[in-house]
Image (tube, grey):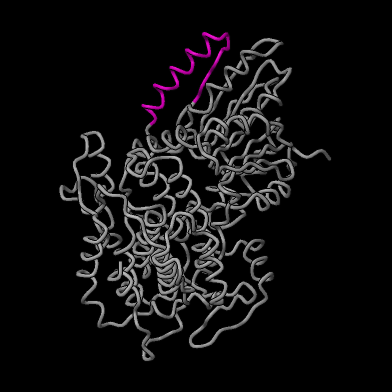
Amino acid sequence: MEGINMWLSICMNESVNQDFAIRRFCPERMEQEQGGGGECQDREAVLDEMIELCSSDAATNASPCLASSEVDDFVDSFINMDQYQYDNEDQVEKHQSFDHFVVNGEDETDAYSMMMMMNDAFGYVSTAIVDDELEIYENVTVAMEEGEVEMNSSCYDTIPELVPCVEEATLGMDQGLDLVHMLLACAEAVSCRDTHQAELLLSRIWALATPSGDSLQRVSYCFATGLKCRLSLLPRNVFAESTPTTSTIPMAVPLITRENKLEAFQLLYQATPYIAFGFMAANEAIFQASQGKCSIHIIDLGMEHTLQWPSLIRSLASRSEGPPKLRITGLIGNIDYAKLQISINVLVEEANSLGIPLEIRIISEPATPSLLTKEKLNLREGEALFFNSILQMHKYVKESRGYMKSILQSIKKLGPTAVTVVEQDTNHNGPFFLGRFLESLHYYSAIFDSLEASMPRNSQHRMKIERLHFAEEILNIVAYEGPDRMERHERVDQWRRQLGRAGFQVMPLKCTSQARMMLSVYDCDGYTLSCEKGTLLLGWKGRPIMMASAWQVASV
């Protein structure tokens, strides 16, 4: 442990540019640098302009600032101190600013040897795994020896290979604080496009971060991977002088298949309440709003599975007035849905056995204003129409809010009985990269902490959830800009404003007791539930993670 501390205690050199500390990100003064100077702007005016005028992601070129004390407050706020042990109970030094992480070029030659030393210290060695798990590791390992999956190698050429760990490697408190400080310093170096400084910091982050350590090490590994990929895309990312197009930002070929992603999603649904919470709230809203309706039509935005619908079908079958006719139209984009059809057939048989005539239609197109019409959706007279969006609505935000507004207005014109919206309750769509990085690091740290508390450290299921689901989200948030950045999560207040401006009003959810009963099934005390202006919020230790809501066309 002494060797680790000595290695992390990098001496500050006066000749090195000390202006890379995150201390320069200040919420009270958004400062966009131009050359050697910057022009101060009013924070609210900048954000309003970004939101209302639908500006592009070119704003991510700005370099906002954060005071050193605010960095320390941030670090303290998101690290779960309970999982760390002081190296010396009598002497706990207050962590310093990022200045001591500005490193010298002379240290660069020792990066690899230092990484190897750290790996030896923590015991990151490979071990035998069963055949069905080996395929997952091969899919996500960045060193693809057999070339089965081609990818943008520049994003991953220095990322250590993913290997399982035979021992539970846990950082001490000092190392955990240092790791977070290095991540934030590296994020600012990337934001300022200082490739050399970012690479030096990444070499030290790799020595501490690992996909098989504690929750902080694992989430840090994901964010470091995103920073490395963003570095490789810097010449082609969107800056103030360029226009965002799909041709200027080539998206790396995914490391994992759609089947891998779906498997991870199913495991997340089974192991945690995050997805089940959304399904339960949305189904309850549909069930309550469809009382007395003899025919129901649900438009499912982004339907890639049928996990949500068995519980709703059983509830509808138990109605006192008898089961209704049910139609589900799934919009799934341009993907092969052969395997989805298998689960659809099973769902239809189950519905028929419960006395519910079920018709399911799949449209292989993403939701667009031109698709959201009575003719193309085959709407019928007398049907109660519902729109259902589970972790999909944020993908329509794109690089401007005009597209989102057109989607919502198209839905409103169809006169739905209700629109259910389940989303991640966090702001990953801010105009500045550093702000998004801080918010996403805070958010996913809470998620990884909850996974740590819910499943064993060596759980293969947890590894799949983190690497095949959340790591993909983090990579998209951190590495990409423009139309390729799809994970544009927003907070419930922003959704309330957008839906309100489009002519919707909230339908208060009345399933708090059911949600609390559902949470009691999970053998974990960290989950929290709250209600805010008719929407339900599921969190981890008070930090909101998911929001569930239902909306109806506002009465004039």
Q: Residue at x 51, y 39 (%)?
A: 524
377 shown above or below 319: below
How many marks the image carries: the answer is 0
Q: Is residue 525 magenta?
A: no
Q: Please name whichever residue, 555 or 307, is drawn nearer the observer in this view of the structure.
A: 307
- Is residue 376 among what the camera can see? no
Q: Is residue 105 above or below residue 461?
A: below
User: Who's the residue at 66% across and 39% down the image?
Assistant: 549
- Residue 514: x, y in percent? 64, 29
In percent of width and height, residue 87 lies at 39, 65
Q: Residue farthest to the front?
A: 90
Horizontal placement of 395 versus 234: left or right?
right
Seen as rendered, the residue at the extreme bottom is: 15
Asked if the magenta segment contains residue 358, the reply would be yes
Judged by its main secondary structure, the magenta piece is helix
Seen in the image, is 210 located left or right of residue 485? left
The stretch of residues the image draws in magenta is: 337-361
Determine which quarter of the picture holds residue 505. Answer: top right
Looking at the image, which residue is at 30% across and 48% down?
A: 255
